[in-house]
Amino acid sequence: MEYPLITINYLAVVLAIVVSFIWGGLYYGPLMGKRWAKEMNMDFTKKPDKKVMQKSLAVNLIGTFLICYVLAHTNQVWRPSVWGHIGADGPAWSYGFWGAFFVWIGFFVPLQLNKVSWEMRSWRLVAINVAHDFVQLQLISQVLAHLR
C-alpha cells in the first residue's frame, strides 16, 4: 500500500492564519458586525473588556491554526503527485476550492445547523456564520494550495 508524501509549508500556514484574521476582522467588523451582534443579542457599541478580548483572540488563534494545519493536509491528499503518480496535478485553485468546499459542507455547515436545533439560534445568524466560514475556508485553502 502506498502512503501519501505530505509536506507542509509552514510559512503558508502562517500566511493563511493572517489572511483569516484579516477576513474575520472585516466580516465581523464593518461588513456584518452590527447584524451579527443584533442576532447574538449583543450591544455592538460597547467594547469588550481587554482581558476577555485577549483571551478570545488567543483561543481563536489556536482554532485558526488547527483549521489551517488540517486543511493543508486535506488539500494535499487529493493531489495525485502526493501519492506518487507522475503527471500534472491540475490547477491549484481547483484543489483549494474543492478542499475547502467539502470541509465546509461536511463539517462547518452541520455544526451551524446544530446551533439552530439545540441552541435555538436564528437562521439569520446561521446564514451570517456559514457565509463567513465559506469565504474563510476558501481564502485559507487558496493560500495553502498556491503556496504548497
Image (tube, rainbow, N blue to C red):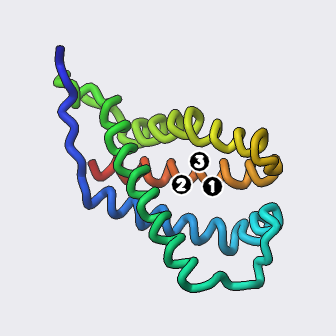
User: In the picture, which quadrant includes the N terminus?
Assistant: top left
What's the residue at 53%, 37% (across, down)?
Answer: 101
Residue 21 to residue 49: above or below: above
The reply, left or right, for residue 67 in relation to residue 136 is left
Label 1: how many Cα within 10 Å (few below 14, some 14–19, many 20+) = some
Q: Amino acid at mark 3?
A: Phe
Q: Amino acid at mark 1?
A: His
Q: Where does the image place residue 77, in percent across and percent down from the top left?
A: 31, 31
- The residue that mark 3 highlights is 134
Instruction: Label 1, secondary structure: give it.
Output: helix
What's the residue at 66%, 48% (across, down)?
Answer: 130
Q: Are marks 2 and 3 in contact (CB under 8 Å)?
A: yes
What's the residue at 77%, 83% (across, down)?
Answer: 45
Q: Are marks 1 and 2 in contact (CB under 8 Å)?
A: yes
- The residue that mark 1 highlights is 132
Q: Amino acid at mark 2?
A: Gln
- Furthest residue to the top? 1
